[in-house]
Amino acid sequence: MAQDSTPSGALVYEARGLKKIFDGGSVAALRGVDFQVWEGEFVAIVGPSGCGKSTLLQLLGSLDRPSEGSLTYRGQSLADLRDPSAYRAAEIGFVFQAFHLLPTFTVAENVQIPMFEGPLSRGERVARARELLHEVGLEHRLDHFPSELSGGERQRVAIARSLANNPSVLLADEPTGNLDSENAAHIVELLLQLHRDRHTTLILVTHDLTIAALAARTLRMKDGRIVHSPPDPVAA
């Protein structure tokens, strides 16, 4: 059953004619994408491998720049950002399929990584990491290393890390792709709980249609285009 996402009326993302070309024009990952995402929504993006889902998420997180078209975040062109890393640090939390935890850092240290360039003191960072690990049910693991954790626990650490700077948007790229069904269900429930409790805008790429069905809206992609998009919840 889809979540009751209640957009506030504030437009978070807007794409118009968005294209992304690779290899000197020989590969078109995105072929003219139009969509909007509103404050507090949970939007799922589905489609076959190679359809452009992850490329789109990378553009939303300003990890790459569009080749053509426009993409704005709260009215600001992402292509024109002077410091994309500052945008990511302040606004965006990433959750990836592969976890991307540093093996020589403890769980608590991994969660602190996004805070290292911020204003918090070491003591404040440690306290914040403990708070976030408690929120994802892993406070008892804070001094462990990633190699000592299960796949589900590693993804929980990655989610805690994504929340380090209290982001407005969570971008999740196949967050259950490396997990068994039981751990996948726990991770999905955790993301939904964070979405509800924090009123965070959640955009999730997935192959799993049962996960996508939990979203308020599902964008279906094929060959670099959005081929199905339900009516905008605010515009409607």
Image (cartoon, grey):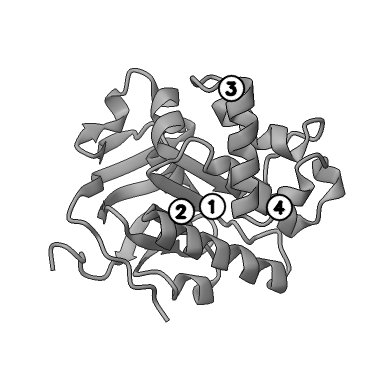
Q: Which one is in front, 105 or 88?
A: 105
Quote the CA–CA distance across marks 1 and 4: 22 Å
Among numbered discs 3 and 4, the one appearing first in the sequence: 3
Q: Position of residue 3 (x, y in %)?
A: 38, 73
* Mark 2: amino acid: Lys
Q: Label 4: which residue?
A: 138
Helix, strand or loop at mark 2: helix
Q: Label 1: which residue?
A: 173
Q: Is residue 45 above or below residue 60?
A: below
Q: Label 3: which residue?
A: 116
Residue 222 visible in rendering: no
* Mark 1: amino acid: Asp
Among numbered discs 4 and 2, the one appearing first in the sequence: 2
Q: Label 2: which residue?
A: 53
Residue at the spot 82% in from the left edge and 40% down from the top edge: 145
Q: Position of residue 64 (x, y in %)?
A: 44, 32
The answer to whether the residues at label 1 and label 2 have Cβ atoms under 8 Å apart is yes
Q: Position of residue 162 (x, y in %)?
A: 54, 42
Q: Is residue 214 above or below residue 104?
A: below
Among numbered discs 1 and 2, the one appearing first in the sequence: 2
Among numbered discs 1 and 4, the one appearing first in the sequence: 4
The answer to whether the residues at label 3 and label 2 have Cβ atoms under 8 Å apart is no
Residue 109 visible in rendering: yes
Among numbered discs 3 and 2, the one appearing first in the sequence: 2
Among numbered discs 1 and 3, the one appearing first in the sequence: 3
The answer to whether the residues at label 4 and label 2 have Cβ atoms under 8 Å apart is no
Q: Which one is in front, 116 or 95?
A: 116
Front label number (1 vs 3): 3
